[in-house]
Amino acid sequence: MNKETSNDTSKETPKGERIAKFLSRAGIASRREAERMIEAGRVAVNGARIDSPALNVTAADKVEVDGNPVAAAEPSRLWLYNKPVGLVTTERDEKGRRTVFDALPEELPRVMSVGRLDLNSEGLLLLTNDGAIKRRLELPSTGWVRKYRVRVHGVPKDEDFAPLRTGLTVDGERFQPMSVTLDRQQGANAWVTIGLREGRNREIRRAMEAVGLAVNRLIRVAYGPFRLGDLKPGAVEEIKARVLRDQLGLGGGEDKTGTAKKKPVRRRKPGGAGAPAKAGMPGTRPRR
């Protein structure tokens, strides 16, 4: 192959990364949602609106979404958040209910939730600024167990949970086997620990109803290796870069020691109001 041919070949390899991945890493939206935003004509590169995700961009390119400039991706970060009851895990609620993103501390950058917890559920919710991490942690193929402390009304026996351990079908939807441990009876209620590897909409509540038990409290206490611990309701704490690197195989930014960002981010003061996120970016918090 002559020199001229070699140079032509190098020009055929685009530099940078795909625009949807760039937007995802910048915390704008998941890669799939970013592709929909591009197709809707909401994304511009170097002043020209694009309608196809088949484009690579570099740090030298100027990328805008809805006319707002998008900064290059920051180092990947992950936070633990103790979600209180009464908040919905969505960017904007059609019923006007308060959302998780309304309640987050002002100093937090744009973040996305990893999965969801419903209105009446509480406990550990992971937040990230990196759409690739969000997608990776949500995939059932990661095999990470989500653990819950569940309070049910009644006096169940261990054998009552056999259908949950073998897997059951509710309203035509098949639930994978769960690990279920009957912990203790407390008056008219019983506490149960449940582990599952994929979470469907209201899965635990629906499964319990199928065996005749009503859930009156549900707390997620772990998501894979990440645990709620003694984090107080409404508080946020960032995962150390070293832990993020070890658990996800990431560099964790430029912090090679893993000692950065050790100070927890505390919940906002009572009465504080969060600004609404930009429309069309579900599951994200706007950059302040």
Image: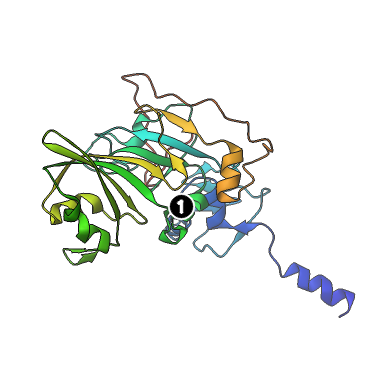
Quarter of the rendering occupied by the N terminus: bottom right
* Mark 1 surroundings within 10 Å by alpha-carbon count, few (fewer than 14), some (14 through 19), many (20 or more): some
| Quadrant position of residue 151 | top left
| Outermost residue toward the bottom in this view | 1
The one of 183 and 176 positioned closer to us in this rendering: 183
In this rendering, position of residue 201 left or right of residue 60:
left
- Residue 104 shows in the view: yes
The spot of residue 55 in percent (x, y) is 59, 62
Q: Amino acid at mark 1?
A: Leu
At x 32% / y 43%, what residue is drawn?
Answer: 90
Q: Secondary structure at mark 1?
A: helix
Return the residue at label 1. 137
| Quadrant position of residue 113 | top left
In the image, is residue 37 above or below residue 266?
below
The spot of residue 103 in percent (x, y) is 35, 30
In this rendering, position of residue 257 left or right of residue 91:
right
The one of 80 and 148 positioned closer to us in this rendering: 148
In this rendering, position of residue 180 left or right of residue 48:
left
The spot of residue 286 in percent (x, y) is 44, 37
In the image, is residue 153 above or below residue 9?
above
At x 45% / y 56%, what residue is drawn?
Answer: 41
